[in-house]
Amino acid sequence: MCGIVGYTGKKQAAPIILEGLSKLEYRGYDSAGLAVRDGEHLAEVVKASGKLKVLSEKTDNGNALPGTCGIGHTRWATHGEPNQTNAHPHVSGNCTGSGSGEVESEVVGVHNGIIENFTELKAKLERHGYKFYSQTDTEVVVKLVDYYYKKYKLGPIDAIAKTMVRVRGSYALELMFKDHPGEIWVARKDSPMIIGVTDGDTYVASDVPAILKYTRNVYYIDNLEFAKLVPGEAHFYNLDGDEVQKESVEITWDAQAAEKDGFEHFMMKEIHEQPKAVGDTLKAILSEDDRIDLEKLGLTPEVVNSISGVDIVACGSAWHVGMAARYVMEDLAAIPVRVELASEYRYRKSPVDKDSLVIVISQSGETADSLAALREAHENGVRTLAIVNVRGSSIAREADSVFYTMAGPEISVATTKAYSTQLMAAYCLAVEFGRVRGFIDDEKYAYYIKELKAIPDKIAKVLDDKERIQWFASKYANAHDVFFIGRGIDYAICLEGSLKLKEISYIHSEAYAAGELKHGTISLIEEGTLVIGVLTQPDLFEKTVSNMVECRSRGAYLMGVAPYGKYEAEDTANFVTYVPKADEHFIGSLAVIPLQLLGYYVSVAKGLDVDKPRNLAKSVTVE
């Protein structure tokens, strides 16, 4: 959520900051602002509500603001409505926050995250004469830094350290001090932040695409650390104010990977990248003799055999991956699996099994609730495994083992290739767990590996038929209610299909286990309601078809997703799209593709912003 960019060096700062913020628009935002200082001159703050282009026009693409040191932000509203006054940066002085002009303040700052005790802190500061012009928690934390900076006549190191100890919540904080020209100070707790250093220039951002144009080597700030950035240098400190040394991490994907590459939207580009991303994820874990090598993750046969059960913890689409993985893992490895919403897991008081394995799934590796769940598992002494896409992310650093997916940068808010690579990772765990635990013999193991290796080409085959989905989507772009139904793995795929439709087309849609329709939901079916049945599981095909017939008899229009050869689906459904045959455990990777395309084409037909749906953000770093 939100985007942070900062620069100090030899070049004009504002154009660099604006360009960097444009690379983070996918994260979701409703206002933008920047603050730039020119040598000894105080920072000039410019803010605007709405899209980044408003801020760019206001500053002539940044050219109107001289200065080689600055910070910028795109805000996703949490505290206070989305307007210019509440936009960042915020200042320690008592100005109106109107959004333009030189600011008489000791401290200027921007912030990602949520300050949980901001009301208490605000009251404290008001007692000390501070006045507030915005409704934000960010203004509170900036003025708290100012309070410690002035009251105790501390330097930035001690003022920031005292603030970090006093604040509860999550933050990526970026600050400039009046008396420290050319310096940017940053601090972090639970919200991502990266720093890039080149010859004479230093960059900071909340995500890689913002600075990838300038450097591939970045530093990750750990939790409860802060840093001083000066041209060409970065100095890191712990809460005691002691300097700590860090190693840089190389970003392996290039800037082109974060561009649309001729596609109208990032989402469609990323849908088409799935064959390669899924294939790369499999190749990364396969040995030369076609064995799934979990030992490189620290999951030795002894560890796998000692596992009494698995808890899969995730949010959103990653939770849907867990739902599909449960069916596959329980069937192939005979391991009991629970799938938990990360936002609920940490608050449940269920008994702890020290021999279980907690698998945390997150694209960004920064999802706040998932990170909190991981820490909860550690506090309970349970082994953890992370399935993440971003090297150096918080979840990757803190988990006992990490299975990296090879999706590359995913820009569209609606996930596609990250979801598919997470599915592949889950399949690999299930197959290897089954082999190690003695439930899969060598012949069956070779068969499953062959099936997994065939998935990328089969996904490409599904994409070849996308025009039929586009035609169907144009007919139902004005639907008001859509229901997805399936059983077993098909139900798990329905959950993801429903989310894809609702999050980018704003059509109300729900996914149901097909057998549950008659327990209340079928009362919602009326003439013209679209019901989509996923029909890939051989043993459940007829049962789901029967449920679809029940909907049709009440006026529903039926769409089916079925494997090649199951043409009898056309006897029931009004429209059927087919996917290649595959093993029933893995065919969900194919069945989800038409549902991704359906959501995309419906959104396009409605003229909506596919990559940046309203009210949503790519990386949810607040609870």
Image (tube, rainbow, N blue to C red):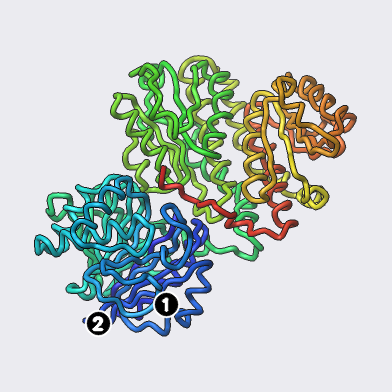
Q: Is residue 568 visible?
A: no
The quarter in which the C terminus is drawn is top left
Figure quadrant of residue 132: bottom left
Q: Which residue corresponds to mark 2?
A: 41
Answer yes or no: do the residues labelled 1 and 2 have beta carbons within 8 Å?
A: no
> Taking 345 as reference, is 531 left or right?
right
| Vertical comparison of 125 with 451: above or below | below
Given residues 566 and 45, the one toward you in this image is 45
Q: CA distance from mark 1 to mark 2?
A: 19 Å
Figure quadrant of residue 17: bottom left
Which residue is located at x 44 percent, y 33 percent? 342
Figure quadrant of residue 143: bottom left
Which residue is located at x 73 percent, y 51 percent? 602
> Taking 48 as reference, is 485 left or right?
right
Q: Position of residue 286 (x, y in %)?
A: 49, 36
Of callouts 1 and 2, which one flags the residue occurring earlier in the amino acid sequence? 1
| Vertical comparison of 431 with 391: above or below | above
| Vertical comparison of 117 with 292: above or below | below
Q: Which residue corresponds to mark 1?
A: 15
Q: Tag 1: residue type?
A: Pro
Which of the labelled discs sits on residue 267, or is there none? none
Which residue is located at x 76 percent, y 35 percent? 532
Badge 2 element: loop
Given residues 252 and 178, the one toward you in this image is 178
